[in-house]
Image (tube, rainbow, N blue to C red):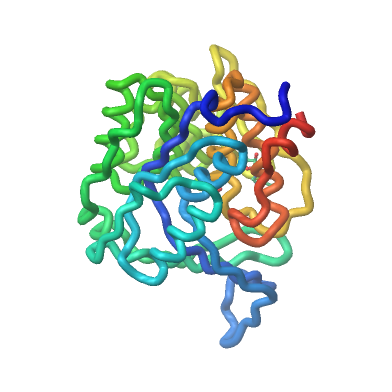
Amino acid sequence: MKAFESKARVRPVFGVGLCVVDELLRVEDAGVRAERTRYLERAVCAGGMVATALVQAARLGCRAQVLSVVGDDEEGRLVARALRDAGVGTRRLLRSRRCPTSVAVVLVDARTGARRFLVPDRRDVERRAPRFDLTPIRKGSLLLVDGHYPVQALRAVRHARRVGAVVIGDFSDSRPAYHELLPYVDHAIVPAAFGETWRGLSPRDTLFALRDEYGGDPVVTDGRRGALALVGERPRRVPAHRVSVVDTTGAGDVFHGAFAAGLAHGKAPFEALQWGARAAAACCTALGGQTRLMNLQEMRRAA
Ligand SMILES: Nc1ncnc2c1ncn2[C@@H]1O[C@H](COP(=O)(O)OP(=O)(O)OP(=O)(O)O)[C@@H](O)[C@H]1O
Ligand SMILES: [Mg+2]
């Protein structure tokens, strides 16, 4: 394999979904019951499922572009700048006063790396979103959706199906809007919470239920227990890599971004999932979902 290959031969990756600011605080007790709790470290960075996935795909040598909206505010400018600096195309990242940028406060437990989120209710904001421009999604493109902006996401997955683009879905749990998208999703990569909230299912049963209802090649991720994939007819395990964990925020998002990048580089789905697991483990070794991302050389060296 050549050390440098032209980006033109790599399939483009688009993302429709959440772009926010993450304010991360590493604390000794993420339960925070005491009147005063000190934090050990703070980081402010761009976050959101699709935003983080796109940054990882760009780091792995893909042409990545965001199709979404942020507020016409200071936080929106921070997000746009961070995405641009990471090499993600922001020409179609809309600015709207009607859609103020959310800030997610993330409390990261210093002992375990587990995180808790403090987030606003975004339902009204997402309903007010302007129409996203989907024209750059063409045959052979890869499209990431995370279920945010459900009306726009449904337009996007239907458009993708029409033109012959491949859709990768990330749905944090089971909601009616996500089930409307699923028939158009080729690779649903969902956390274990999805099956639990859907029908109280184990990861293995979630795979078969997703396949029966919606087809495609589903995957269930389960933190440091790794992921289970239904590629073909048999569930296959994608082990998580052992790392010294600082913060697991964004591990799932990075998994999706690296999986998309693997497909974009022409890898088979199972190998692309291994890209996902490697990149997600690396992401867990620093505070913030976009702080420690693997590049193409590191990925190839690790293979
Ligand atoms: N502690 C960990 N050590 C190594 N790898 C991890 C760890 N946590 C997660 N991963 C990797 O990341 C993948 C996705 O993790 P997880 O199932 O926690 O996603 P998630 O709940 O969607 O996370 P998030 O929404 O915060 O991005 C796992 O399948 C695994 O490969
Ligand atoms: Mg997730």
Q: Which residue lies furthest to the top in this view?
A: 233
**Residue in the foreground of this view, choosing between 220 and 298:** 298
Residue at screen point 33% across, 47% down: 92
**Residue in the foreground of this view, choosing between 53 and 176:** 53
Residue at screen point 59% across, 39% down: 255
Q: Pinpoint residue 186: horizontal percent, then vertical percent.
A: 42, 24
Q: In which quarter of the image is the C terminus?
A: top right
Q: Quadrant of the N terminus?
A: top right
Q: In this view, does 196 lie to the left or right of 108?
A: left
Q: Is residue 4 left or right of residue 216?
A: right
Q: Pinpoint residue 260: horizontal percent, then vertical percent.
A: 53, 32
- Which quarter of the figure has residue 210? top left
Residue at screen point 68% across, 41% down: 295
- Which quarter of the figure has residue 302? top right
Residue at screen point 67% across, 73% down: 41
Q: Is residue 211 left or right of residue 110?
A: left
